[in-house]
Image (cartoon, grey):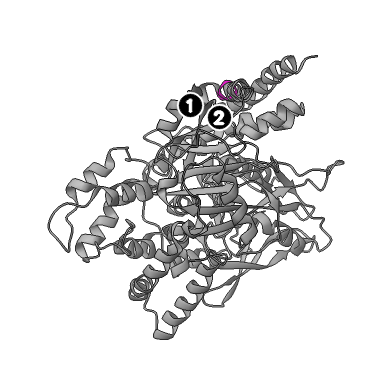
Amino acid sequence: MSRSLVLTAAFGVGAGVVATRWFKEEKASAKLTPNHPYVNDVNASVPSREQQMLRLQGANPMNPFDILVIGGGATGTGCALDAVTRGLRTALIEQEDFAAGTSSRSTKLVHGGVRYLEKAVFNLDYGQLKLVFEALHERKRLLENAPHLTRALPIMTPCYAWWEVPYYWLGLKAYDAVAGSQGLTLSRYVSPKESCRQFPTLAAGHGDGKQLKGTVVYYDGQFDDARLNLALATTASSLGAAVVNHTKCTKLLKDDTGSVIGVEATDQLTGKTHQVHAKVVINAGGPFSDSIRQLADPEAPSMIMPSSGVHVTLPDYYSPENMGLIVPKTKDGRVVFMLPWQGATIAGTTDSSADITMSPQPMESEIQFILDAIAEYLTVAVRRSDVTSAWSGIRPLAVDPTAQDTASALRDHIVLTDDSGLVTVTGGKWTTYRLMAQDAVDACVASGKLHDHKPCCTSHLQLRGARSYSPSLFTYIAQHYTVPHRPGAIDTAVAKHLTAAYGDRSMEVTTIAEKQKLGRRLVRGHPQLEAEVVYAAREEMCENAVDFLARRTRLAFLDIRAAEEALPRVIELLAEEKGWSHSRRHQEHAAAAAFLQTFRAEMVT
C-alpha cells in the first residue's frame, strides 16, 4: 500500500476515533449557560493564603477532601479546576509556586504538533496521529477559554530547495485537514519577495548558497504559559478549591490496608506541618512524579524520562511582531524556532537529555547552538551580547511502567492508578492539559470512592479574566485610566499589556494605580506597573519577589537586567503589603538575585 493511501486511511480512522470521543464528551459535559452557577463565581475574589491554609487544615479523617492534587503546574491546576467544577471538594498543594517548574518554561506555543503528524505518516504511527487530532481540538478550546492570554500566530517555514515547497505545503495542508473545523487559518505558500517583506530579517540566500524559493505559512496558537497556569489556579480557588502554593508534600498518609488517604504537608513559608486527608490523591508532580510515587511505594518503577528544551530571548527587531519562523530540521536534525513574544523574540530548540532539578540552567554550548542555527536564516547579525535572558525547561516524557514495550517515551499522557490508590497523571504537553485533567479525575471517579459528582464541564469554561474580555478592551483602559503622577491618559503599550495579562481584571489593577499612586513603570522600557505588585499580592497568591518577576510578570524571561533593576522596588512594595521585617527583605533580595542568575548562563557583555 502506498504511503499516501496509508495516510488517507489513517486520517479517516483517526478522525472517527477523535470525533467519537468528542461527541461523547459533548453529550456528557455540562454546558456553561449564563445561568450555570459557576459562571458568576469565576470572577469572585480569590481567598487569601491564610484562608486557603485553614481550608486545608479542616480536612480530617471524618471530613476529608474528595480529591487532593499534588503539583501546581498546568496539569495539577487543571485537575483542581476539573474536580471542583464537578462539585467535588478539592484541594491542591504546590511545593514552590504555580508554574515554577516546566509550566512556565515552555515554547509558549499552543500547538497540535506538526512534527508528530510527520512522524505519524512516515512511521505509520497511529498513536502519533491520535495525539495530533486531540491536540488540535484542545488548541481551539484553550484559545476560546482564555482569549486574553492567547492568540493565533502565523509561522513561516522557509524553503531553500525546490522540493521543500511541495513537501511542506502538502504537509501543512494535511495539518489543516486534520484540524478541520477546529482550525485557525488555512496554511498558504508565500513567494520569496513577499516572504522577505513580511519577515524583513529573513535571508534571501542560505549559508550554503541556496536561494529562498518561498515560504509556507501555517497557524498555531501562542500564549503566556505562567499566567495561564495562574488563571487555572485562581479560577479553581474562586470556585471553592483550597489551592496553596509553597506547601510541600513530605509524606503520604495510608490506612491499615495500605491505601493512600492523604498527605503530610509542610508550609514552606512558616515551617508548620499539617495532615490533610482526602478520599483520592492525584500525583501531578511533572518531572517529580516518580519521587511522589516512591513515597507510596519505594520500589515503584520510574515513569519519567526527563527532556530539556533551551530558549533564549533576543530583541524585538529579530522578528516581526506578528510572524514566527520555524526551521523543521537543522544540520543535526533538531527543530529551531524564532517567535515574537511580549515585545521580544524567543528562539529555541527541541528536546535533549536532562537531569531533574527545580532550577535547570542552559549550557553556554546550547545557547550558542541556537544562535548559530538561526544566523543561517537571518540577515541581522546574530550576537551573543543580544541575549537578554536564557532558560531551560524540563519536560516529563512518560513511559508506562505496565506496558510490555517501553523502548520509547510517549508524547501522549499517561494516567495510572497504583495499588495504593494513588492516581498519577504525567506526560502530554501544555496544549492538552485540560484533557489530561479530565482523564485523571475520571480515574478518581472510577475508584468508586467519590459520590454525587457532576460530569466534566471544563470544555466550555472560560478562565478568570476572560468573561468580559474583548480585543478592543485596551482602548477602554486607555481612555478611562487617569495616570496619577502626570496628566493625560495611559499610553497604549501599558494598556495593551494590562489587558493581555489580566483580561477583564485590568480595571482592578488601574484602580490600585489611581488610588495608591502606583502608576509608574517598574523599570524603563517595559510596561509593567508598580500597581501590579500590589494586585499580585492581594489577588494572585504572590508570596515573594521571584513569584512576581518570573510568573506574575515575565520580566525574568524577557530581560534579566530589567528584572534585577526592578527587584528593589518589587521587594519594597511586597514588604509593605505583607509586613516583612528588614531581615526578610534582605533574604528576599538574596534569594531573588540567586534565582535570576540561573537565567544568565554566563552571559557576556
Amino acid at dot 2: Gln
Q: How many marks?
A: 2
Q: Is residue 135 left or right of residue 486?
A: right
Residue 328 placement: quadrant = top right
Q: From this viewpoint, is residue 68 visible?
A: no
Label 2, on which residue? 211
Going by the image, does 406 lie left or right of 222? right
Name which residue lies at 66% across and 29% down: 117
Q: Position of residue 211 (x, y in %)?
A: 55, 29
588 vs 559, nearest the viewer = 559
Q: Is residue 567 left or right of residue 489?
A: right
Label 1 – label 2 distance at C-alpha:
9 Å
Quarter residue 162 falls in: top right
Pinpoint residue 18: horizontal percent, then vertical percent: 64, 26
Q: Secondary structure at mark 1?
A: helix
Please name the residue that numbered disc 1 is placed on: 192
Question: Residue 377's x, y, as percent?
Answer: 54, 40
Mark 1 vs 2, N-terminal side: 1
Magenta includes 425? no
491 left or right of 407 in image: left
> How many residues crowd around disc 1 within 10 Å: few (fewer than 14), some, or many (20 or more)?
some
Return the x and y of residue 329 as percentages of the image width and height: 65, 37
Q: Is label 2 in a helix, a strand or a loop?
A: loop
Q: Which residues are magenta?
A: 175-179
Q: Is residue 138 above or below residue 81?
A: above
Residue 112's tag is none
Q: Residue at x 61, y 20 (%)?
A: 166
Residue toward you, 315 or 269: 315
Residue sticking out furthest to the bottom: 583
Give residue 420's quadrant in the image.
bottom right
CB atoms at circles 1 and 2 under 8 Å apart? Answer: yes
